[in-house]
Amino acid sequence: MIVYFKVGNYKSINKPLTLNFNSSSIGEHSESNIVNNGKTSLLKSILLYGHNASGKSKILDALDYFKWFINNSATEKNSNQDIDVEPFRLLESTINKPSYFEMSFFIGKAKYRYGFEADRQMVHKEWLLEVKVTKEYPLFLRIGQEIDIDFKRFENSNDLDKRTRKNALFLSVASQWNVKKAQEIDGWIESIFNIHGINDKDYRQLTIDLLNDKKYTKIVNKFMQKADLGIDSVDVVDIPIKFEDIKENIPEELRDRFKEELKRRSPTTVITGHNKYNDNDEFVETESFIMDKAESEGTKKYFNLIGLLITALLEDRLVIIDEFDARLHSLLSKAIIKLFNSGKIKTKAQLLVASHDTALIDGDLLRRDQVYFIEKNVRGETKATSLVEFKPRKETPFDKKYLEGKYGGIPFIDDLESLLING
């Protein structure tokens, strides 16, 4: 479980910004929206709000980069390649400084704090600490290419400092060389689901796999039925696409690449079943449709997310979704958030989303410490402020006050109509 994530000098973020999943002392929804891991009380979900270009996506990009660099830095690069990290570029003083990333998290009952600082040339600092009660024990500390390792706590890591390139993370190298704790951390980071709201199709196969598993076929169908989409059933069939049947429609210079792409594609087609009625509103039979041709974009997005949601809740995973509410009705978005905030479902899964849907800023759904407002200052620096820091009363209509500008994070748009009045 994630405790907090901190990032600084990355894209639109200059000064270190923290998303904190530690619950505050407020009392609302304490039986549902909080999960206890030992003596630590953590929020099950956090929502980010802000106008377009406020930096919400950049915060989630930072988490995605943190994950990618840990999972890939030991294998992706040679010693001469640049690190693909971007500092805050709107101040001269930050361009040549390293970007900063740190996360505190639980894997089971073990708590860790891990982070690194890196620019395009090298990893400047890296640290991993294990937290025991109130004391932290360094497993390794790195400055440049000097790595101080506690071999008792970080077993089987002898001589791996010599195998670590300046543009690679020591944690990644240790995982590659079968250091158990490094592999556990690397695996936990890799298990994070990170999805952009308009690229949800990447996760469709996960839903299809569950649908094809007899243990989950019924629950996937129930998820579709209970969303009031007019769909009574969902199934998959294999309809292979033959290259010979479509090659005449493809430019000759693209045929080889397209042929290879077809080999990688799943031939599976999703079929939705709708009830068919006679003129007396009596059920007659089920009519089948191809989802991609007949269903709305919102329906397709929801189907794509089902497998991810079920897997995350069953396996206690962190889910990150940008543009969360894109193509989803407010009530369906609320239903998904309620899954993670549920006091009835036994799970330690967590949800972090960016949204524009103010209907979700609802005191009946969220605690005040579960909402962050994201905005930029005059320098273009992204900052984040939790709703609880404004100290509103819990009965306050948060969505109304947000749109009135009480909490920041809204656009101040000039009159667009005047631009065209005179042609």
Image (tube, helix red, strand yellow):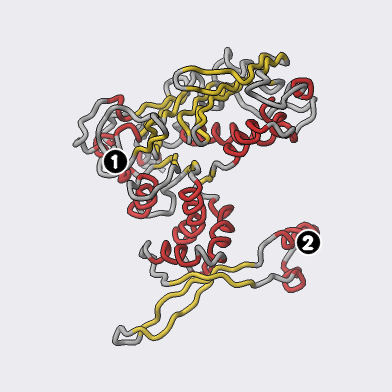
Mark 2 falls on what kind of element? Answer: helix
What amino acid type is highlighted by mark number 1? Glu
Query: Where residue 361 appears, x then y in whole percent?
Result: 30, 41
Query: Where residue 133 appears, x then y in whole percent?
Result: 45, 22
Q: Looking at the picture, does residue 235 appear above or below residue 413?
A: below
Q: Which is more toward the observer, 128 or 287?
A: 128
Q: Which is more toward the observer, 310 or 151?
A: 151
Q: Which circle's residue, 1 or 2, is located before the other in the chain? A: 1
- Where, quadrant-wise, is the C terminus in this rendering? top left
Asked if residue 320 lies left or right of residue 46, the reply is right
Pointer 2: what residue? 255
Q: Nearer the viewer, mark 1 or mark 2?
A: 1
The residue depicted at 35 percent of the width and 44 percent of the height is 341
Q: Looking at the picture, does residue 338 appear above or below residue 2?
A: below
Q: Looking at the picture, does residue 247 appear above or below residue 190?
A: below
Mark 1 falls on what kind of element? Answer: loop
Asked if residue 396 lies left or right of residue 285, the reply is left
Q: Which is more toward the observer, 189 or 332?
A: 189
Residue 176 is labelled as none
List the single residue furthest toward the front. Answer: 152
Local packing at callout 1 (Cα closer than 10 Å; few below 14, some 14-19, many 20+) is few
Q: Which is more toward the observer, 193 or 61?
A: 193
The residue depicted at 41 percent of the width and 27 percent of the height is 384
Q: Looking at the picture, does residue 398 appear above or below residue 102?
A: below
Pointer 1: what residue? 31
Query: Where residue 204 appears, x then y in whole percent?
Result: 56, 57
Would residue 108 be seen by someone viewing this image from the given angle?
Answer: yes
